[in-house]
């Protein structure tokens, strides 16, 4: 159970390890420490450059490039790299701390020179029905978008493809549109999660209707917990996009705002759907409990029918099994068949009674 | 179960297929690809014209007609047609995308030149107790109202009749009144749904009170899920009508506002009624569970009464069935009748006891 | 069950029959079509006139009377009368439609010339524990108050008496005070309902505590449904009175506002009480279920005690009822009494055990 | 049950008796009609006077006294006294009506000349676990504070003592501070209630954990109902104090505001605690139901163990009790002991099985 | 149970003891009366002084020190000390009263000269699963931060270390940063609590899934109650930090605001997590009840299977145990084996039936 719980407080646990350090101390609080790489994509409508490096100095000069540049730092455990970039790009120390402390709620902060976003990339492990979340930080500054990931593997490949092959308008627009494209990719990822949860809900529905599995209640519980976790992320995400689409920062151009508004609409729909699933999960539990209650009732009926038919019969047999010396019936010629008939009649009446009660 | 689930996430599923495409790409995300037709109605207080075509060029010239014109595009899977119309009428690319992407929540967007509405037409399949929803997009621009449907079949026939036969004031008013008439027809459609849900609720009430059906809980569950879905649509619809009736757009004339206000009142009532039905469905489940609990109690009582009467009697019979050589009662002359009388007294006392406990 | 459900959607059902008609068509959507009469009361501090008529022309001249005039139209099914009055008094067509369409939520609309209120008069049928609602529309215009009822019988008699016998200040004040007096009478009527619901709740409390009735759960369900319906009416009513007591219309004099504020306070209390009753009804259901659960437990205990005592005893009796040839105990002289004593000891130990378990 | 219900609607019941009377009619709607007395305390930092009278004329001259004066009218059933005082002090007729009509929610009304507060003094009857509420009206006007009680006995004694013995700053401050002191005393009274409810909750917790009482669910129900009632009073009380501490009236001096803010903080805490108790009461019910469910399970296990062990054994004994002529086992020498051993083995295996299932 | 309840109303209990005293009377309402000490830390970027004293006069001169000074008063039961300090530092009497009255909700009050905060330090007793709370009051005034604790032992040691060893920026910033550091330490403490609750939840999850413990429901109840208590503290705490980080007081420098904003973010996360745990605790209870219901069903099945198989068999054995003289089967040669075979067939059919019903 330990691992499944992970998503809820584990992150906080790490924070408390950090407790006592002075604020502004750059400490990575996550658990991924293998990958490190800087991926760079530079483009203008005509040109396109792409390279990977592990030397932070290679990318610093891009700050003042006239081309739109996306610098993706994979592996924030390299606090030295984050610090160097932060220094060069003029990022506030508390922002750098937030990038490294993976316990942030999704949030947005506007500064004069740049915009800072923290988002969550949630992935679903189909074996354990478990959600894991990775923190993605994004900074829009001038022509640059900086993104910070904890480990390799993300949901940005479609964006990369669009840049590489100059699909859509992405190469024609600036860095704010790039920021939109990345946020959009992250938000679209939630729909994938919802589909998986939808599939699982459908399976659970069948299990509940047919009462076919032993651990249905446990599965509903895990489903509910996943939805609670998802909800914890989706509501602040919605706020973030609401704030950005209100267009209060000059760093986001007027013409890009409708796109952010569009993503905002998506987050509303995601939030709606999560609530819907929660209602459905509760409904499923009710159906399960009712069905279980029905079943117990069925079992009881079988027992009662059997006992009610055979107890009186056994009693009658018991009477004529007594060894009294003076029991006239025992010596009657038709005693035995009469008793058998009486027993048959009693059994028949019982069955009639149960039919009338609709137990049979 | 698969089909019933349809309404909740299926639409999202399609969206995620679209994931990765650059925004602004016109892709129809629905499943209806058979029907295609453009229906046109042009009218002024005196004149009236109506025709159908499958050639989009036939309708483009109507943009600047002095008559009020309703252009109904059936079959948005023909993205080329939507694009051509969008281009000609000066509709924003993101709006066209929303028309084709059938996963929108009901919403309204005001532009300088036109108003864009996305609404949902929900139909109820009485066999499967299933709701299906079709997206209807409406654009009011100058003298024209453009409507976009996924497939043939809608709820606008009464409006068509009123235009054709010049009933009411519709021919005397402009395009904004036409927009109102169409929205009103869509909202009225929800009352039909509510009635069907009402009928179903009544049937369920009877089933619950008489505990007559096996699958009552399942039906309550389906009812609840339908209400959850309905609610997901009705609340944004309410917002849409609130926004439009506030009269912030010059495209809606002052004199038409009271009509929109009227439809807004309807949506409030629909939302109220949906909430009421949810409360009632929960209440029904409570009654069902209580009745089931009552029934189990009844079954238990029958069992207990039978067991409590016959176990002691059978035990007594068992005693005198023992084969001890020295059992004086066995040779008593009145032993047998005395035992029978004792048994009768015990049974009688038991019955009295159960009567006192009100189990009988 | 059909009739009881009436209050919830029945009204909507009628609306959907109206679906397709152009807005502004005057159609009465209710079911009362017997009564028709116009009651008129005209008064000034000195004078008082009262008459009844079925001829609408008799009352039209009163529009410009200098006396305060109350025109009560009973029977809105006479759409011709409503239309004639509406025309003469300059009432908007949509308002007339609302008067005839009895599916309105309580609402208030301010116009330049007049104020329009829709309220609900709810009555409680003590036999069926059913609520029925009648729509009362009120229009304040100049010196006149127009009221529209569906059928004869209302809660305004105390107001009539005060006018007739010049009790209180009613004759000294104008038409806005008359409006207040009528609204106040309608709101007071809710307290009567609440009392009846209170009585019913008390009876239900006793039934639940003593578990004396079979259909307690059904009654709680009906109570809850009535409260849901009541709540659906009371919340918009509260809004109506809040709006009117804010004094934004010049048609309501400053000095009459405290009176409306007073009625507003009443509606708050009514709404509070309805919520309180809902909580209590839920609490009662919990108690009922707990008691039922207790009872099942009691029944189980009786069964278990009986079975646990007699099964071992019957088994022992069964052993000595076996017909083995070589069973030494059978020929012991004290075999029979010893077995009886052993049985007694076992029974005694069982009773002690159950006492310890507090089952006895 | 009748008496316990009292607090919820009884007051409304009286209101409906008043229904039909013109507004502004002074009618006392409560039930206490024995006590009548006017208590007067006049003080300045140096002086102090105190007297009791039943003649209203004795106190009228105090209106213009330069000393701070508290006039406490005990027994509002004397409507003539209330009217006389109202007239002399220039109190609005509707305010006087509110004083006499004990069905008010706690509220505050600011007038030019005076402030009017309605509060509730709730007392807890420890025998019946019942809450009763008395309406206390307070008017601050110039140097005077008028208080109106329904009957003798209140929570103001500590305030009286502080005035008499010149403790604290009360004699140094004006009438607004006196108002504060009285409101504070009334609010503090709620803490006494909460403590009693706390004690009761503790007892209930023990009862639930040990399942020691028969009527635990009923007690939880009464607790919940008391909390619902308390909540109904505490929320408007909180609003009252919020409004007064905002300092919008010139009748409350700037320097007294922090004191009212302090009482406001108390009401927030009271409201918080009431909500907490409601959550706890719900939790207790859950625990009770779970424990009851556990118990039924326990009872079932005992029954099943006994039946499962003895039914097969009794069956075996029954077989060898059959009277077939040709049953070889019966004549075996070791038949009887072998059967006994077989029975022992079966019983042993059953016990092992139940141990494995952890039923034993 | 008494001690566990402590956190909920005990504090209020003490308040009511205070009832009747004039406001502004300095009375300590807590229970810790042993410890008393004043700890002082003075520092500038270069210098650092630290000393402890029990003589309040030693610290008064520090009010006007140019160094940043933290005066920590341990043991507010020494009301004379609090009064002396309050007098010297110009703290309002009501503030001093709040410091001594440990029943405050977390709150912040801005004065011209100083800021006053009341916070709660909650500790978790792992043996009793009990929360206890201590009130910490903080005053920021000029270069000084005054803190008031009820007893020795706090969560400020990391801050002390940072000051002593000049770690981070704390010695470079002023008193407002010190205030931040202290508040931050108090808020971080909640994460420790959440972890412990997380551990407990995990253990409970396992207990629920394996139904391994007897008192699981009780533990869930205690968990829920702890969460209710925690929530009662965390919501006002969140408000406090929201207010302070809005930067409306000139006592908090602009550059320190981001730090308070950061702590505010933490409190949001804590509040979110508490809500999440409440949802999880409710989910656990549902799973527990379902599992219990499953188990009862299992027990019932075992009983029913045994009874259904053996009752008919025992009945048959009973028939042939009857002593009728004329029972032809008894003298049949194959009577006995035939009966045994019949019994075997019946038992076999029963088993087949139960298999089909999936009870076996």
Image: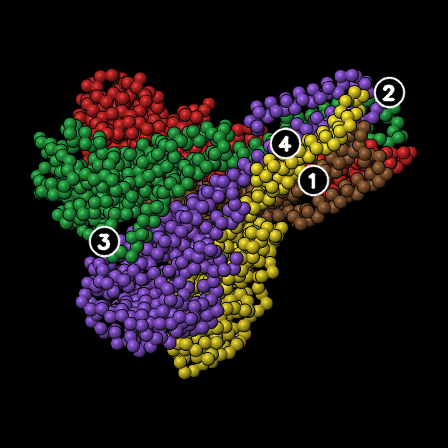
Chain colours: A brown, B yellow, C purple, D green, E red
Q: Which residue is mark 2?
A: D333
**Alpha-carbon span between mark 4 and mark 3:** 67 Å
Badges 2 and 3: C-beta atoms under 8 Å apart?
no
**Alpha-carbon span between mark 3 and mark 1:** 71 Å
- The structure residue drawn at horizontal position 59% and vertical position 50%, both measured from the top left corner, is B211
Badges 4 and 3: C-beta atoms under 8 Å apart?
no
* Callout 2 and callout 4 share a chain: no
Task: Provide the chain ID for the residue under circle 4.
Answer: C
Residue C309: image location, x then y, percent: 66, 27
Q: Which residue is mark 3?
A: D25
Q: Which residue is mark 1?
A: A308
- The structure residue drawn at horizontal position 55% and vertical position 61%, both measured from the top left corner, is B124
Q: Residue furthest right?
A: E333
**Alpha-carbon span between mark 2 and mark 1:** 38 Å
Q: Nearer the viewer, residue D37 or B231?
A: D37
Q: Nearer the viewer, residue A332 or D358?
A: A332
Q: Is residue B162 left or right of residue B131?
A: left
Task: Provide the chain ID for the residue under circle 3.
Answer: D
Q: Residue furthest front?
A: B333
Residue D56: image location, x then y, percent: 14, 43
């Amino acid at each position: 159970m330990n691992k499944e719980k992970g998503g809820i407080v584990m992150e906080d646990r790490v924070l408390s390890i950090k407790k006592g350090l002075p604020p502004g101390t750059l400490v990575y609080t996550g658990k991924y420490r293998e990958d490190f790489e800087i991926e760079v994509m530079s483009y203008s409508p005509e040109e396109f450059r792409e390279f990977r490096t592990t030397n932070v100095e290679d990318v610093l000069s891009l700050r003042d490039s006239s081309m739109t540049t996306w610098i993706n730092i994979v592996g924030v455990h390299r606090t030295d790299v984050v610090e160097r970039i932060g220094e060069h790009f003029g990022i506030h120390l508390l922002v750098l701390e937030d990038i490294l402390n993976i316990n942030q709620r999704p949030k947005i902060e506007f500064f004069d020179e740049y915009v800072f976003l923290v988002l969550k990339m949630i992935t679903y492990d189909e074996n354990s029905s478990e959600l894991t979340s990775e923190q993605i930080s994004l900074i829009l500054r001038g022509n640059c978008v900086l993104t910070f990931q904890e480990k390799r593997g993300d949901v940005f490949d479609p964006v990369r493809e669009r840049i590489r092959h100059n699909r859509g308008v992405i190469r024609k627009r600036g860095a704010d549109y790039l920021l939109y494209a990345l946020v959009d990719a992250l938000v679209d990822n939630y729909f994938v999660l919802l589909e998986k949860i939808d599939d699982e809900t459908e399976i659970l529905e069948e299990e509940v209707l047919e009462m076919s599995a032993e651990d249905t209640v446990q599965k509903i519980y895990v489903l509910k917990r996943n939805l609670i976790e998802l909800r914890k992320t989706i509501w602040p995400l919605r706020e973030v996009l609401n704030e950005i689409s209100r267009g209060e920062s000059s760093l986001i151009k007027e013409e890009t705002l409708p796109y952010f508004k569009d993503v905002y609409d998506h987050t509303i729909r995601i939030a709606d759907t999560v609530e819907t699933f929660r209602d459905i999960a509760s409904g499923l539990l009710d159906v399960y409990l009712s069905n279980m209650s029905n079943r117990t009732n069925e079992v009881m009926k079988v027992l009662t029918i059997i006992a009610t038919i055979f107890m009186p019969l056994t009693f009658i047999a018991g009477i004529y099994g007594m060894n009294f010396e003076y029991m006239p019936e025992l010596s009657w010629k038709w005693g035995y068949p009469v008793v058998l008939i009486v027993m048959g009649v009693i059994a028949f009446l019982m069955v009639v009674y149960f039919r009338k009660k609709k137990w049979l």
